[in-house]
Image: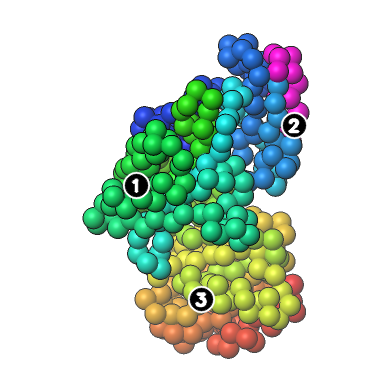
Amino acid sequence: MNIHEYQGKELFASYGIDIGPQVVARTPQEAKAAQEKMGGTVVIKAQVLVGGRGKAGGVKVAKTAQEAEQKAKEILDLTIKGLKVEKVLVVPAADIKKEYYLGLTLDRFNKKLILMMSASGGVDIEELAVTKPEEIIKFPIDASVGIDKDGLDKALTQVFEKPELISQARDVIQTMYKMYLEKECSLVEINPYGYLANGKLQALDAKVNFDDNALFKNPEVEAMRNPEENSADEITAREAGLSFVSMDGDIGCIVNGAGLAMATMDIIKLFGGEPANFLDVGGSSNPNKVVSAIKIIMNNPKVRGILINIFGGITRCDDIANGLLMATKQVDITVPLVVRLIGTNDKEGREILQKAGIEARTDLNEAVKAIVAAR
């Protein structure tokens, strides 16, 4: 789960990390009032759950209240990477002497957290990792042991030039680590981490992502979820216990198992089609999941065909077949439908569908070719 910059900074502030003043504005008039309260030059930043705001015109500087109102209006009129800007963040323009980068994420391969630091903050860290990887210092952290403080101090000296900056950064990193564990994060990032003219380091931006699988343990994090992060179909799917991701194609997919779903989408593309979604009904044999899946897919006006691909293990093919028949009574399926059933109770499942006039195949390649041709 992702959250907006202002939410990340609010979370930082709750842990004692200095973020400076900030005001969230939903109208140009609110942005004007924020500038009047702060005084001086302000930066107005679009709050959308995608990167590239600056390049899209979503970050502007205003020196007066009137400018703040106008610049906020311009930003609020934007749509950035398909997302309408609904609110902006107004912050005082910082007197920055230098920009650093701090990031904490998971190194799955080594089964450790990885702290990344750089004296070249304020830039695209992914691009920096490719063009100048030596400028990113990586410091592993074993969560079962905690931070090696001596090792951290040694790493910090490679990034921060002054002892007083090392001391400030050390405290913030320890706080980031604490927050990462307590809130079950997958990424905590400060970029830029600004060295200001007053000698202080300040979090001038925030990017925080959370592990979806741990949200049930952190209702206060779940409460920060932004509806624009997911489509209406994705929200409905989550409520129905389905793993669903919208895509740009026209072949709706219903599959059991994430790996099989990925393989199915690959095969659809191999034979010239484009998947409209990733949808995993999981290992359950609950027929109602099939009903929910059909409803979600038929809600997409781009869908021109549906492929159901079930490799029965825990999932029983006869339950899938019964779920499909239930769906046909509740939903008007107006596009071609191809079903492939193999595995547990596949014979029974095919018989159920055959009696209803629906053919169920056993060969996946043939099923995919059929739906690609029929759409």
Q: Amino acid at mark 3?
A: Leu
Mark 1 lies on a secondary structure that is helix
Residue labelled with disc 3: 260
Q: Amino acid at mark 1?
A: Asp
Specify the principal SS of the magenta part. helix
The answer to whether 210 appears left or right of 369 in the picture is left
Residue drawn at x 58%, y 84% is 364
Residue labelled with disc 2: 77
Q: Which class describes the residues within 10 Å of circle 3: few (<14), some (14-19), or many (20+)?
A: some
Mark 3 lies on a secondary structure that is helix
Q: Mark 3 and 2 residues: CB-CB less than 8 Å, in contact?
A: no
The segment highlighted magenta reads 63-79
| Placement of 147 over or under 277, stated as above or below | above
- In depth, the one of 178 and 185 nearer the eye is 178
The answer to whether 183 appears left or right of 323 in the picture is left
Nearer-N-terminus badge (2/1): 2
Screen quadrant of the C terminus: bottom right
Residue drawn at x 29%, y 55% is 143
Residue labelled with disc 1: 153
